[in-house]
Amino acid sequence: MVKTRVGVVGCGSIGSEICKAIDSDEATGLDLGMELKFLIDTNPANVDRLCKSLTKTPDILKSDNTGLDRVLDTVDLVIECASQAAVREFIIPALKKGKEVMILSVGALLCESGLFEEIEKIAKEKGCKVHIPSGAVAGIDGLKSGAIGGIHKVELTTKKPPSGFEGNRYVKGQGIDLLSIKKAETLFMGHAKEAVKYFPENVNVAASLSIAGIGSEATKVKIVADPSTKKNVHEIVVKGEFGKFFVCIENEPSITNPKTSYLAALSAIATLKSISYPIRVGT
Ligand SMILES: NC(=O)c1ccc[n+]([C@@H]2O[C@H](COP(=O)([O-])OP(=O)(O)OC[C@H]3O[C@@H](n4cnc5c(N)ncnc54)[C@H](O)[C@@H]3O)[C@@H](O)[C@H]2O)c1
């Protein structure tokens, strides 16, 4: 079988999980049928660390985008799991060369005005797929289906222990004393576009829901400091012509980056599986 040639930008928490899954897919039975051709990370130490954990070192290891045109020629699929800036830096050139892409820093599509439309336009012109995994949320399947018939409401409530908001400038600016919070307290209510300005750590979840559903100005977000929880909890309520659903996710942090939910890396690997496997279950 001809293997799909893959390049990965970002060798941190999510990138490492993705690369290990590709590298060990025969042993684990995942059977992705992919091979790693390049790794790019601005921090060479992260590339080194990752390579030590792989059975086969990819041909091209880089710390910047020099010679990107030639590097992109070596692959069929480019995976971005680095940063919002990396989406413009690597995904746009990859699409222009007709490569299939996957974006993990989905918040970039909410924060940089016009980027989503630009990506959509190039992908249509070049006939390539842009994969955006569900990331740290569940319910994207129902939201997409519901949106076909019409959605009336999408509401995300994110709950974290008060300590999870330490150092947040908006919380400080509101004069909220996190140490004095003894029962659940709402810190913010507004739409997704506004929420990500004040709570950038929520940006990927808000972006995924907005893109799958009814956009960032219609998607409502509530942020709660809740001393009774130890996890990052996302509750999603969707109402539409289909009826209503409620999803609650209590995410475990990834071991190597506590800011990232483990589910995000798993959803990227599941997306790779859906690319390579002929039977697709779920919307
Ligand atoms: N879609 C989701 O639900 C979801 C969930 C969690 C994280 N994310 C996003 O995925 C991305 C990766 O997350 P992570 O936990 O693996 O982060 P991480 O910090 O563990 O790793 C990121 C890696 O990318 C590298 N990097 C940063 N900018 C780069 C650039 N311009 N070019 C090349 N390399 C660069 C860093 O050196 C680092 O090694 C982040 O943008 C994060 O916000 C998305």
Image (cartoon, rainbow, N blue to C red):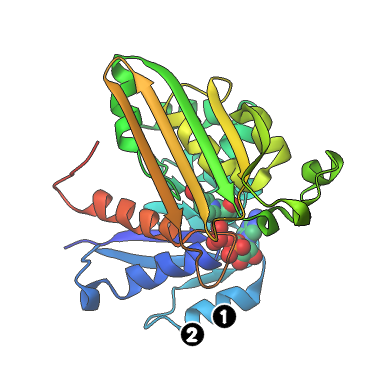
Q: Position of residue 279 (x, y in %)?
A: 13, 47
Position above or below: 41 against 89: below
Residue 60 visible? The answer is yes
| Left/right of residue 256 with respect to residue 135 in the rendered view | right
Q: Nearer the viewer, residue 156 or 123?
A: 156
Q: Is mark 1 within 8 Å of ligand 1?
A: no
Mark seen at residue 52: 2
Q: Quadrant of residue 40?
A: bottom right
Can you give x and y, in whole percent of width and height, for residue 209 in the image?
Answer: 46, 34
Name the residue: 57% across, 80% down.
Answer: 48
Q: How far, Cα to Cα, is label 1 from label 2? A: 6 Å
Asked whether the viewer can see residue 128, the reply is no
Q: Is residue 161 left or right of residue 246?
A: right
Q: Quadrant of residue 197?
A: top right
The answer to which of 2 and 250 lies nearer the viewer is 250
10 Å crowding of disc 1: few (<14), some (14-19), many (20+): some
Q: Which residue is identified by label 1?
A: 48
Type of amino acid under label 2:
Lys
Residue at point 79%, 41% (across, down): 170
Tell me the quadrant of the picture where the N terminus can be found.
bottom left
Residue 5 occupies which quadrant of the picture?
bottom left
Residue with the most extreme front position: 182
- Circles 1 and 2: CB atoms closer than 8 Å: yes
Q: Position of residue 146 (x, y in %)?
A: 31, 23
Q: Residue at x 30, y 18 (%)?
A: 148
**Amino acid type at image mark 1:** Asp
Q: What is the crowding at mark 2: few (fewer than 14 residues within 10 Å), some, or many (at least 20)? A: few
Q: Quadrant of ligand 1?
A: bottom right
Q: Secondary structure at mark 2?
A: helix
Q: Nearer the viewer, residue 126 or 215?
A: 215
The answer to whether mark 2 is within 8 Å of ligand 1 is: no
